[in-house]
């Protein structure tokens, strides 16, 4: 084979390889993060399966949004404190979450409720404080000691709000009322609870 023919042959082979690569379908630039499964569940990009939506749980949420204390209690028993707090991100459920936590079996949600009492809009703060007061009014339980860290943090947050003179007096008065119930349980020093709003 002459040098000219050899160069032509090599060029032909190189073109064939390049063309073959180009015929392959390009990979998508991004892959979907979640894939819906046939049973209503989903998988993340890592392949981790997510639980399918339970129609019964969704029904409980729907009932509790406009329902009474029985509906709120049933929702709390069904989903638990952790899932309730996760549901707080959905605007239609925010008040429902705060109200439902009054029916929790422990005080693990106290810091969450205390933050809502200090920083949320008035209606949400009032709902959070009502739930705190409801929990604090219950008889003491043997499991209370297991939530000692949450109780300490929650009480500290409430005290900070109660002592903040820039807060509206009505909000502070509700916080002080909740703190006095917690003081009755021995979780807050009564001397630390502000008295400047007491009737004179």
Image (cartoon, rainbow, N blue to C red):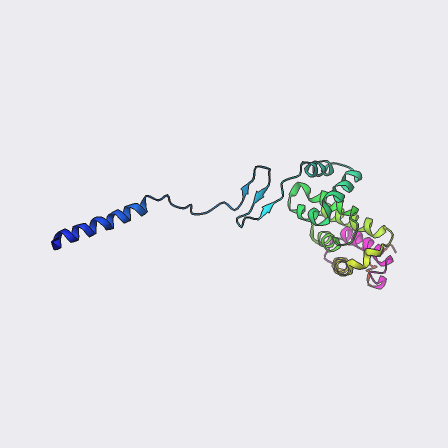
Residue 197 in view of the camera:
no
Q: Residue at x 82, y 56 (%)?
A: 143
Number of numbered discs overlaid on the protein picture: 0
> Which is more toward the observer, 69 or 175?
69
Image x and y of residue 200, in percent: 88, 56
Q: Is residue 158 above or below residue 121?
A: below
> Which is more toward the observer, 92 or 13?
13
Image x and y of residue 90, in percent: 64, 43
Q: Residue at x 84, y 63 (%)?
A: 189
> Which is more toward the observer, 172 or 150?
150
Q: Residue at x 65, y 43 (%)?
A: 91
Q: Is residue 166 magenta?
A: yes
Image quarter of residue 64: top right
- For the record, the magenta segment spans 164-191
Image x and y of residue 179, in percent: 81, 56
Left or right: residue 161 compared with residue 36: right
Q: Residue at x 69, y 44 (%)?
A: 94
Q: Is residue 148 magenta?
A: no
> Which is more toward the observer, 11 or 166?
11
> Which SS does the magenta portion mostly show?
helix
Image x and y of residue 66, in percent: 73, 36
Image quarter of residue 77: top right
- Residue that extends furthest to the front in the rendered view of this protein: 1
Residue 56 in view of the camera:
yes
């Amino acid at each position: 084979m002459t040098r000219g023919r050899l160069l032509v042959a090599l060029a032909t082979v190189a073109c064939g390889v390049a063309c073959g690569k180009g015929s392959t379908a390009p990979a998508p630039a991004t892959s979907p993060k979640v894939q819906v499964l046939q049973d209503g569940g989903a998988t993340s990009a890592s392949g981790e399966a997510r639980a399918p939506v339970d129609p019964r749980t969704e029904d409980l949420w729907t009932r509790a949004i406009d329902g009474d204390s029985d509906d709120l209690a049933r929702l709390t028993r069904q989903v638990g404190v952790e899932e309730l707090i996760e549901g707080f991100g959905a605007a239609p459920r925010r008040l429902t979450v705060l109200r439902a936590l009054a029916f929790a079996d422990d005080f693990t949600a106290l810091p969450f409720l205390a933050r809502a009492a200090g920083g949320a809009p008035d209606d949400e703060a009032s709902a959070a404080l009502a739930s705190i007061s409801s929990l604090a009014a219950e008889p003491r339980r043997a499991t209370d000691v297991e939530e000692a860290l949450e109780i300490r943090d929650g009480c500290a947050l409430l005290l900070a709000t109660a002592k903040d003179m820039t807060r509206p007096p009505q909000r502070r008065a509700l916080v002080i009322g909740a703190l006095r119930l917690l003081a009755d349980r021995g979780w807050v020093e009564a001397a630390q609870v502000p008295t400047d709003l007491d009737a004179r």
